Image: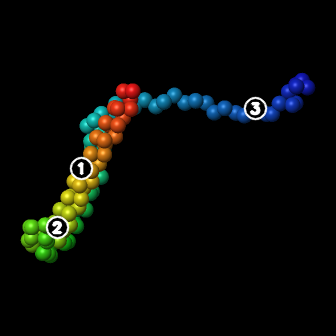
Amino acid sequence: MGPDEKLLPPRAEVPPVLPPRKRALPASVVGRAWTALLPTAAVVVLVLIFVLQNLQRSDVTLLLWSGRLPLGVALLASAALGGVAVFLLGSVRILQLRRLARRSGSR
């Protein structure tokens, strides 16, 4: 050990780099679909339980239409209409942003 080695900080141990694990089977679209199936099935079961627990009839009025629907169905229909409205507004905004990006990119 020379005089220069005393001034240097001790060397840190570098952990060994492990090679990436090989998968037994490659990932596929069908495999990911099966993975998404379980949470989707759980949501469908929860929605069915919600509708079946809220079967009492209620008066529903929308613009010029009125009628009697089970409460669960009316709430699901209103949520679906809200989702469609958000989808349409979001789609219009995406189209605006694409048009803006196309214009600014062509200059």
Tell me if residue 87 comes above or below residue 45 in the rendering: above
The quadrant in which the N terminus is found is top right
Neighbourhood count class around disc 2 (C-alpha, 10 Å): few under 14, some 14–19, many 20 upward: some
Q: Tell me the quarter of the picture where residue 25 sits.
A: top left
Look at mark 3 in the image and give the residue it sits on. 11
Q: How far apart are marks 1 and 2 (CA)?
A: 21 Å
What's under tag 1, amino acid-wise?
A: Leu
Horizontally, residue 31 falls left or right of residue 104, namely left
What's under tag 2, amino acid-wise?
A: Ala
For the residues bearing labels 2 and 3, Cβ distance under 8 angstroms: no
Look at mark 2 in the image and give the residue it sits on. 74
Give me the disc on residue 88: 1
Residue 8: x percent and y percent?
83, 30
Q: Residue at x 80, y 33 (%)?
A: 9
In this view, which residue lies farthest toward the front? 107
Q: Which of 50 and 101 is in front in this view?
A: 101
Q: Tag 1, which secondary structure?
A: helix
Q: Distance between the residues labelled 1 and 3?
A: 60 Å
Q: Tell me the quarter of the picture where residue 104 sits.
A: top left
Q: Which residue is drawn at 85% across and 27% down?
A: 5
Q: In the rendered image, is residue 12 in sight?
A: yes
Horizontally, residue 86 falls left or right of residue 73, namely right
